[in-house]
């Protein structure tokens, strides 16, 4: 490795091999050499030639050899002494016989005379003999233009001055650039684009999949930032003659183009989040969530599992203080889903948000638990883990294909207290009424992870950005309402340790969460209780023009931009009566009523209904003659038509 060259420090090199080409040497030598014999000789040539060949010319004397000098002439006829001048940046070394290999010499003579310098072969060396043809041509051009009268040192000084000037300019620009940028930021105000610009961008946006130029995302991003600043201080920064609605329409349009969302979904999100928080939510959906695993305490401990994975090159940390079994994986040199520990069932790949519903359910040992939508089995195995393989878990799912993964995970994790069933959750109380009430006497706890639109897991499934509309949301909400009523009907309110229902979704839509919970509160004898989770945001008690039950504050919402986990909603019910309220108008509820509740509970209600119905019939029967008399009086008062 060589030394690194610092371009900022340009050291001047001393006279070396190219020094004979300098104009200064010719001027100095012209003082001592006769006219017509101007030439530059290599510095080491005089010392390398044999001493016998040196000829000394003196005024009025003939050349003489090594001997024969008289005493009077011995001093001034002696050979000129060579004085070594070390050059800057060049190393000068002496050979074994005292000759100089490289360097520069200055010939000094006492009387100011000099000898003619010749090379090793006795011939005088000139500059033109050693120059290349291209160098000779350049030298000729310089002589024609009078360039020989200018020193190269002056050119170097001019170049150095130019470099210093350029550096000073660059320094001034670097110093002034922050101020200039600040001035631009202060003076520049966001202005709404004209209708023509919007139409032109609309055409480009429509033709983005055709061979046309896509929209400039950098410009759109800057416009979003400017629009947000105006909306945060609308009274001061707004443009005259523009309404807030115009800014919001432009902002929604720009965010749809920049983040690739549908206009419908962005409208829904803008209703849920404030504008600054909405940007954070959209940005968080562009980043994948951390990989998390859950330790299977049926087979190992979290400390032992962490040590085993660290030995395999896995970088991990505990998930958080709120979880005693979770681990977060930062990076790994081995596949997390194919380690010997995974195949042995020591852990389960599971999102952090999927642990929350089971923690809220808080199953106890020797209880009867129903997991109504169990696939792929992560929550079911966690319930079995907390119950220590005691009691009974009924793992149900309507999709038979997904039950294969449930069975595989339960076998791998060592779960032995689970029964897998394939049944429609909406008809579960009706189909399983014999097993539910005759044999089991109802479940102690029910977990309902209802199917949803998936708006909380956009980072896993980006297709949700564009493939969901109003019909999909309402269809999911209707299915969730049916499932939650079936889940409530499957729980025995008289359970000594239970009587709880946990409802959760991986959606952030109000129609799928608070709306469904408020519906269940009106249709069944249940109330909301605390989930037992120390973090998370409270659910909505009012949304736009709708007002929900005040107890919805006990529900919890989780967002990717605040909790670094998938969007999730958790609500916990406590059933206080097996009786069903009388105000029932929906066919789904009526179909589930006679079979979902045991006969011992329904018989008193049916007798009460019959007695009340007979009383109403007797009270509401008006006397027929009175009606006929009233109609006859009204007919008499009508005027006759001509």
Image (spheres, helix red, strand yellow):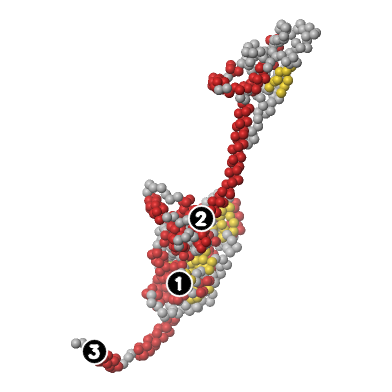
**In whole angstroms, how far apart are the C-alphas of marks 1 and 2?**
38 Å
Q: Which residue is mark 2?
A: 189
Q: Nearer the viewer, residue 492 or 549?
A: 549
Q: Is residue 138 above or below residue 536?
A: above
Which comes sooner in the sequence, label 1 or label 3? 1
Q: Is residue 588 left or right of residue 559?
A: left
Position in image of residue 344 (x %, y %): 53, 56
The residue that disc 1 covers is 546
Q: Could you say which is closer to the camera, residue 403 or residue 126?
A: 126
Image point (70%, 10%), residue name: 57
Which residue bears the numbered disc 3?
Answer: 639
- Category of crowding for the residue at label 3, using alpha-carbon neighbours closer than 10 angstroms: few (below 14), some (14–19), many (at least 20): few
Alpha carbons under labels 2 and 3: distance apart: 77 Å
Question: Can you name the residue that lies furthest to the right here?
Answer: 71
Mark 1 lies on a secondary structure that is strand
Q: Earlier in the sequence, mark 2 or mark 3?
A: 2
User: Relative to 80, is 143 on the left or the right?
Assistant: left
The quarter holding residue 40 reads top right
The Cα atoms of the two marked residues, 1 and 3, are separated by 51 Å
Q: Nearer the viewer, mark 2 or mark 3?
A: 2
At a point 57% along the width and 59% down the height, the residue shown is 319
Q: Residue 391, image x and y in percent?
A: 52, 70
Circles 2, 3 touching at the beta carbon (< 8 Å) = no
Quarter the N terminus occupies: top right
Looking at marks 1 and 2 on the same chain, the residue that comes earlier in the sequence is marked by 2
């Amino acid at each position: 490795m060589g030394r690194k060259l610092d371009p900022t420090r340009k050291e001047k090199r001393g006279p070396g091999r190219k020094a004979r080409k300098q104009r200064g040497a010719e001027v100095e030598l012209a003082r001592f050499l006769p006219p017509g014999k101007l030439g530059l000789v290599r510095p080491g040539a005089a010392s390398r030639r044999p001493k016998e060949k040196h000829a000394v010319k003196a005024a009025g004397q003939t050349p003489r050899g090594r001997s024969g000098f008289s005493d009077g002439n011995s001093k001034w006829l002696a050979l000129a002494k060579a004085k070594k001048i070390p050059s800057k940046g060049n190393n000068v070394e002496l050979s074994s016989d005292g000759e100089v290999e490289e360097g520069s010499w200055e010939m000094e003579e006492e009387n100011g005379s000099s000898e003619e310098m010749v090379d090793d072969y006795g011939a005088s060396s000139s500059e033109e003999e050693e120059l290349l043809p291209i160098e000779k041509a350049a030298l000729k051009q310089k002589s024609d233009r009078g360039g020989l009268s200018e020193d190269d040192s002056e050119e170097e000084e001019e170049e150095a001055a130019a470099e210093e000037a350029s550096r000073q300019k660059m320094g001034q620009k670097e110093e002034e650039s922050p101020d200039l940028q600040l001035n631009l930021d202060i003076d520049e105000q966001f202005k709404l684009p004209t209708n023509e610009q919007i139409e032109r961008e609309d055409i480009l946006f429509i033709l983005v999949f055709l061979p046309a130029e896509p929209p400039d995302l950098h410009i759109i991003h800057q416009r979003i930032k400017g629009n947000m600043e105006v909306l945060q201080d609308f009274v001061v920064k707004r443009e005259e003659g523009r309404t807030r609605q115009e800014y919001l329409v432009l902002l929604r349009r720009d965010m749809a183009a920049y983040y690739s969302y549908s206009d419908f979904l962005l409208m829904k999100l803008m209703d849920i989040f404030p504008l600054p928080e909405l940007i954070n939510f959209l940005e968080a959906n562009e980043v994948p969530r951390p990989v998390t695993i859950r330790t299977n305490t049926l087979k190992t401990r979290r400390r032992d599992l962490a040590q085993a994975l660290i030995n395999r090159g896995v970088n991990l940390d505990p998930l958080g203080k709120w979880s005693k079994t979770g681990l977060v994986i930062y990076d790994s040199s081995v596949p997390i889903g194919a380690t010997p520990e995974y195949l042995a069932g020591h852990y389960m790949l599971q999102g952090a948000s999927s642990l929350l519903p089971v923690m809220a359910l808080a199953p106890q040992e020797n209880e009867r638990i129903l997991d109504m939508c169990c696939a792929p089995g992560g929550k079911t195995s966690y319930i079995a883990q907390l119950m220590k393989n005691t009691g009974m878990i009924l793992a149900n799912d309507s999709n038979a294909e997904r039950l294969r993964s449930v069975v595989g995970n339960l076998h791998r994790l060592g779960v032995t207290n689970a029964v897998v069933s394939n049944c429609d959750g909406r008809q579960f109380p009706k189909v399983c009424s014999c097993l539910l009430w005759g044999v089991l006497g109802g479940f102690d706890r029910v977990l309902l992870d209802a199917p949803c639109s998936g708006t909380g897991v956009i980072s896993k499934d980006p297709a949700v950005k564009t493939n969901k509309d109003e019909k999909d949301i309402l269809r999911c909400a209707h299915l969730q309402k049916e499932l939650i009523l079936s889940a409530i009907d499957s729980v025995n309110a008289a359970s000594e340790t239970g009587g709880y229902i946990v409802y959760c979704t991986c959606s952030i839509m109000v129609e799928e969460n608070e709306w469904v919970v408020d519906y269940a509160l009106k249709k069944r004898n249940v109330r909301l209780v605390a989930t037992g989770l120390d973090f998370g945001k409270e659910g909505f008690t009012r949304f736009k023009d709708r007002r929900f039950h005040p107890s919805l504050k006990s529900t919890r919402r989780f967002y990717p931009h605040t909790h670094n986990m998938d969007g999730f909603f958790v609500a916990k019910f406590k059933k206080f009566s097996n009786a069903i309220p009388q105000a029932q108008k929906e066919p789904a509820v009526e179909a589930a009523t006679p079979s979902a509740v045991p006969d011992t509970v329904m018989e008193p209600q049916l007798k009460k209904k019959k007695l009340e119905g007979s009383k109403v019939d007797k009270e509401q029967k008006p006397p027929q003659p009175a009606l006929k008399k009233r109609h006859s009086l009204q007919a008499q008062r009508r005027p006759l038509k001509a």
